[in-house]
Image: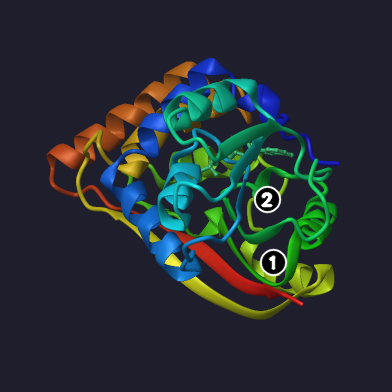
Amino acid sequence: MSSAPSAQEQFDAQASSILTAVYLTPDVVAQREKVLALLAPKHGECALDIGCGPGLTTEALALAVGESTEVVGVDIAPPMLAIAKQRCNHYAAVKFEQADVTQLPFTTAQFDIALASQVYEYVEEVDQALRELARVVRPGGRVALVDTDWESAVWASHDDARMRRVLETWDQHIPHPQLPRTLKRRMQQAGFENIRVEVVPLLNLAYDPQTYSVGMMTLLGNFAAGRNGLSEQDIAAWRDDARAIGAEDGYFFSLNRYVFLATRS
Ligand SMILES: C[S@@+](CC[C@H](N)C(=O)[O-])C[C@H]1O[C@@H](n2cnc3c(N)ncnc32)[C@H](O)[C@@H]1O
């Protein structure tokens, strides 16, 4: 068992609101559009948004499949579901359920398509969750799974040792910080075929609060402070350094997300 905090512990009201703001930055808006285009939802396709978080993908799916087609968002964290419900309350065919993705409250083959963005890396029993996904998607149905390999992070700093330590500590926030490298095999075993992988890089070249990396510094810093020998002062110095390197026009952040597209066999 990993020692990562549970999703319910991590996604309290404050963290859910910070993450929602990060997911509205142009970086993540562009990522969402790319993933949607790869999944290519068709009008009338019944859709499932796994680990829907603040409902941004749920809304995008609803717009793509048409307003009379059922779209369901499922998540374990009540603060996330509250944000998602508010966002989507004017879509009559959008529903939300609180559930664990390892035990989905849906019938077999209920959905034509499913999307899970940045979710399975949080799930200890990821193979069980993938089997549940395979159960609720109809044969021939399509899925898109997005996960990050945090080892792909490149982040400029005047103190590389401290940066490495912050990133190593951040790895502990989830049970599978390098999930993409094993995800294809896991999906095959769970019952998916025609698996194709695309990389979606996030690249920030300026210290700008309206970017993914600067937005995420609050969550990374809150998690890392007090862990792995990192004090509040270390984290404050880490943040100040990012700002300073930005002022010198030397800010550089790059991270890879991987999109796994597949068909239910
Ligand atoms: C990083 S957020 C991503 C949110 C959303 N998919 C998006 O891309 O906008 C991860 C979400 O997965 C949910 N989650 C994590 N583990 C879960 C589980 N075992 N069952 C259901 N939801 C889970 C969290 O509550 C959180 O809302």
Q: Residue 150: x, y in percent?
A: 54, 53
In the foreground, 125 or 68: 68
Q: Which mark is residue 120?
A: 2
Task: Give SS at disc 1.
Answer: helix
> Dot 2: within a 10 Å radius of its alpha carbon, few (fewer than 14), some, or many (20 or more) residues?
many
Q: Residue 265: x, y in percent?
A: 77, 77
Task: Give SS at disc 2.
Answer: helix
Mark 1: which amino acid? Leu
Compared to residue 158, the image places residue 231 above or below, namely above
> Is the residue at mark 1 in contact range of ligand 1, meaning its CB lies under 8 Å from it?
no
Badge 2 vs badge 1, beta-carbon distance below 8 Å: yes
Does any portion of residue 230 appear in the rendered image? no
Residue at screen point 83% across, 48% down: 125
Compared to residue 31, the image places residue 163 above or below, namely above
Residue at screen point 35% across, 43% down: 212
Please identify the quadrant where the N terminus is shown: top right
Give the mark, 2 or 1, whose residue is nearer the N terminus.
2
How far apart, in angstroms, are the residues tagged by discs 2 and 1? 9 Å
